Image (cartoon, rainbow, N blue to C red):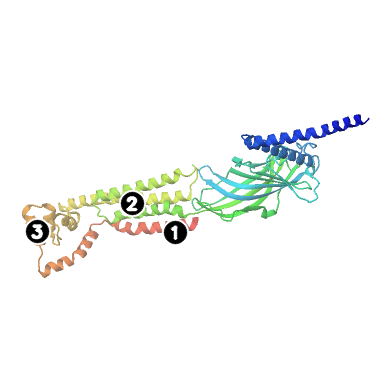
Amino acid sequence: MVLAFQLVFFTYIWIILIPNVCAASNIKMTHQRCSSSMKQTCKQETRMKKDDRTKVRSQKYEQLLHIEDDDFAMRPGFGGSPVPVGIDVHVESIDSISETNMDFTMTFYLRHYWKDERLSFPSTANKSMTFDHRLTRKIWVPDIFFVHSKRSFIHDTTMENIMLRVHPDGNVLLSLRITVSAMCFMDFSRFPLDTQNCSLELESYAYNEDDLMLYWKHGNRSLNAEEHMSLSQFFIEDFSASSGLAFYSSTGWYNRLFINFVLRRHVFFFVLQTYFPAILMVMLSWVSFWIDRRAVPARVSLGITTVLTMSTIITAVSASMPQVSYLKAVDVYLWVSSLFVFLSVIEYAAVNYLTTVEERKQFKKTGKISRMYNIDAVQAMAFDGCYHDSEIDMDQTSLSLNSEDFMRRKSICSPSTDSSQIKRRKSLGGHVRRIILENNHVIDTYSRILFPIVYILFNLFYWGVYV
């Protein structure tokens, strides 16, 4: 009996102690492996265990939200009243506005608010649970799209910028960070003195107003923007939110939300690049009215240069604008300025033609060219360097410049202490002005006054209408 009791006792001790000893030896061996060349493997095993715990925890959350127990392919409250989905938007930036493509690009945070009782869960602390983009593939979310959008994407650096927050009572918040390029129907009739009204429109693609009701969560305060948001060519005058209905003949009425913003263009850039050069070219064309009418190369080259420069300015402006079928404000200004430049060239053509006609008439009457149409004193000064105030001297200068005459004029023009010579030099300016006025055509005289007055009146009318 005693022997049997001892046998049972030793058997019990063997069963209890041997597994613990083996486990302790295994732990010591594992520790030894980790402390040697297997530390990297142990870290990977630890990481895998953490991932497994995360998956288990996620599964616990999903079980807590009853995700596997419900069919989330159907909207909340299917068959009943439409689901109210509140929207608010925080605009981060307006990245670009293209007149050529007639579109704009905007980056913003889009937040959805709705209630899904299927996601309610018990919570003693009444704390919400936050998830990333992976849970959005397993539950129902509103299918919002952007009307008239060309390109759009959800930012995915470093992960998809999606946040889902579920409250114990089933209220859900879904936040997305999105960049959208959408059309803006612009009117360029007042360009570059224009103000553009653009809007981004949000709408459900599948659910009409019987299934889903879109509304602004906080009314007019649902739309916010960064305080220091600015654009290179535009000033943002206003941001506003509005709502309406859209009708499609095959599917019915849909709720639609509008993000409206008003953009006023900065005109100073175009003043420097377009208006100011055009004004300079028009004023430069007026210089020809003050040049002698017989200086044909000077006046013709000046007129052609200004015409070509205006053509270059018009071409540069048209290249950066869409091909619209109506006149823009800048087109009106540039084409009127080109007309003034062109008329200055036509004015000299008329002056030159009438001068030729008058010379022919004078030649028929007197048999010789009169002093008015001969080489005047200013041109004679270019030959011999001194001023001529006698009619005989003028005729001699215009007919020939032989060596004897040249030596005689040189002696006349040599420095002298004679008082009459000093008086003659003092009166040089007045005689030159008189000769220039005598040799100008009457058309040039009127053009010097008429062209600037008409152009100033045009500018007053133009800026009064468009500004």
The circle drawn on residue 460 is: 1
User: Would residue 183 be found to the left or right of residue 438 on screen?
Assistant: right
- Provide the residue designation for mark 2: 344
Q: What x and y, as percent, mark residue 219?
A: 69, 54
The circle drawn on residue 410 is: 3
Task: Identify the secondary structure beneath mark 3.
Answer: helix
The one of 417 and 288 positioned closer to us in this rendering: 417
Picture residue at 56% right of the left edge, 45% below the top: 104
The one of 198 and 33 positioned closer to us in this rendering: 33
Q: Looking at the image, do the residues carrying marks 1 and 2 touch, with CB atoms under 8 Å apart?
A: no
The one of 246 and 331 positioned closer to us in this rendering: 246
Task: Identify the secondary structure beneath mark 1.
Answer: helix
Q: With respect to residue 464, does 216 lie above or below?
A: above
Q: What x and y, as percent, mark residue 297?
A: 25, 48
Nearest to N terminus: mark 3 or mark 2: 2
Q: What x and y, as percent, mark residue 51?
A: 69, 38
Marks 3/1: CA–CA distance: 55 Å
Task: Identify the secondary structure beneath mark 2.
Answer: helix
Marks 3/2: CA–CA distance: 40 Å
